[in-house]
Every structure is written in structure tokens, then in C-alpha cells.
Amino acid sequence: MDPAPAAFTVSRGARPIALVYDSPHSGRYFPPGVPLAASPIELRWAEDAYVDRLLAPAVELGVPLLSGEWARAYLDLNRDVTDIDEALLDAPWPDVVEPTDKTRRGLGLIRRYVVPGLAIYAAPLTVEDVELRIDRLYRPYHAQLDALLQEAQHDHGVAWHVNWHSMKSVGNAMTPDGPDAARADFVVSDGDGTTASASLTNTAVDALRALGYSVSVNTPYKGGAIVKRCGRPADGVHSIQIEINRRLYLDERAVTRLPSFGALQRDLLELTATLSERAPRIG
């Protein structure tokens, strides 16, 4: 049996720049011994499969890349730590509980469903187990992201942060756009202008459109917990979320890469080059 990985990996270029990437949902490790209702391949449907590999060449341009290593179905790093579904637990949660609409749709810190009607867990989870997940995975990941952003801001006067995800090619009953909703190639989100400057958002949108992609802004996603927590434009930290439509590179059911993977990877490297050139810097 393979040993459990660390909570995250960090890939860094020789000369880090003001741009920081993170991919919280690209991990796939799920530990043995957890009573599951979903199969291993079904668990991977919740994953932002291969997003970390799509972004890997960006490191050559100096972009630090933080990637989660554990499955999103085990713990979702892009939720607030209070976004807990107590119905999944064997006892009341001993700390603050502030469930959001994400939890009500089965998409909280501990996810209830892979897709509508397909439960992840076959039995209640213990409070101790969930506390361990938070201490082992959530807190270290967020501490590392904070450190990367602080370093970028210290060295360059500003931090431009992109929180990367992939999205299903069409919506379903658990997503904000609803069942069978068609989606653009990319969704760029900045909390309706609250988590980043227009300069970062517009640079990303314009660059993707120049590459020939359709781009939606803040629809159907406005940005999750990570960009809302990290994005502080008044303090020089600008965070956007970018969702990649899985039809561009993935067989969604088999969770395998399509032949178009390489072309998309090259386009994302070109996007990275544009962002790195436009990012403000000291001097």
C-alpha cells in the first residue's frame, strides 16, 4: 500500500514572480478504511483532475504552484472551516457551525454527494475524524498559501493570485446554474470585483479570449472561499478564480486526458506569460 502523501506539494521556479497559482482540488488520494458508498472512479468525478499537470509548465516562468494532494471528496480545501454538514457526523460539531448554500447542496467542507443522488459515505463520520482532516490537510494548505502570497507581496509589492479549478461541461442540480446548463470554456471570478483589481481580472479574460476561448465572468461562479479569504485588493493581494471547462481536455466519466490536453496546456502557459508580464512590481 502506498504511503499517504503530504497535504500539498509546492513547485517553484528559480526566480519566483508576483504571480501565485494554487490548485486545491487536483489531488486524488483517499485513505483506506473509510466506509464509502461511491466507487473509486466515482470519487474522482469530484476531482479537478489533472489541473495541476495542466499548470506545471508555469513553474518554468517563475510561478509558484501549490497543489492539494488529497481528494476533494475527503475534504474540500475551498470551503470555510465552519461550512460543516452536521448530518454527516455521529455527534454534534463542538465548534462554530455556519453552513452555507454549498453545504445545503451537498458541497460543504466534507462533501455529501459526488453528483446528485450519489452519496460519498456509507456511514456517519466521527467528529474526531473530521477534526483530524482539518488539522492534517486544511490548516497546512492554507498556511502555505498565505506564505506564498506574503512572499510575493514582500518581494514584488503586490501579489496576483489565481485559484484554479475545473468544472463539469454542463451544470447539474448541485451547481448554481442548474441541470443541463451550458457553460463557457472558462469562468473567471473575482467576487463581482471584490477580490481583485479590474487589471488582473481583465488581463486574464482578455488573454483567454485572444486565445480563442469563450469566457464568462462571475457566472455561474463568483469565487469560492479561497479567493474570498485571500483577495484583499486594498492591501495589494489580488485573487481570482478560474474554472476550466472539462470538455476542453478530459473524458469526464473515465477521468482520462483527451488528445487536446497538450494544446490546452500550451495555451495556459501563454496565459501565464501574459499575466506575469502585466503583473505590477517594485521598481
Image (cartoon, rainbow, N blue to C red):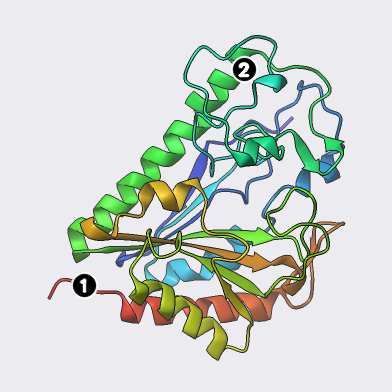
- The disc placed on residue 208 is none
**Foreground: 63 or 36?**
36
Residue 70 seen anywhere in this rendered image of the structure? no
Residue 219 occupies which quadrant of the picture?
bottom right
Q: Residue furthest left?
A: 283
Residue drawn at x 66%, y 81% is: 263
Give x and y (percent) for residue 103.
64, 35
Q: Is residue 86 left or right of residue 146?
A: right
How far apart marks 1 and 2 lie (CA) works out to 43 Å
Looking at the rendered structure, the kind of residue marked 1 is Arg
Residue 155 occupies which quadrant of the picture?
bottom left
Residue behind mark 1: 281
- The disc placed on residue 129 is 2
For the residue labelled by badge 2, is the local secondary structure a helix, a strand or a loop? helix
Q: Is residue 57 left or right of residue 116?
A: left
For the residue labelled by badge 1, is the local secondary structure a helix, a strand or a loop? loop
Give x and y (percent) for residue 193.
40, 65
Residue drawn at x 79%, y 27% is: 121
Residue drawn at x 70%, y 49% is: 47
Give x and y (percent) for residue 245.
69, 68
Mark 2 residue crowding within 10 angstroms, few (<14) / some (14–19) / many (20+): few
Give x and y (percent) for residue 30.
70, 34
Residue 263 seen anywhere in this rendered image of the structure? yes
Residue drawn at x 15%, y 71% is: 282
- Please state, as top left, top right, bottom left or bottom right, where the C terminus lies in the image: bottom left
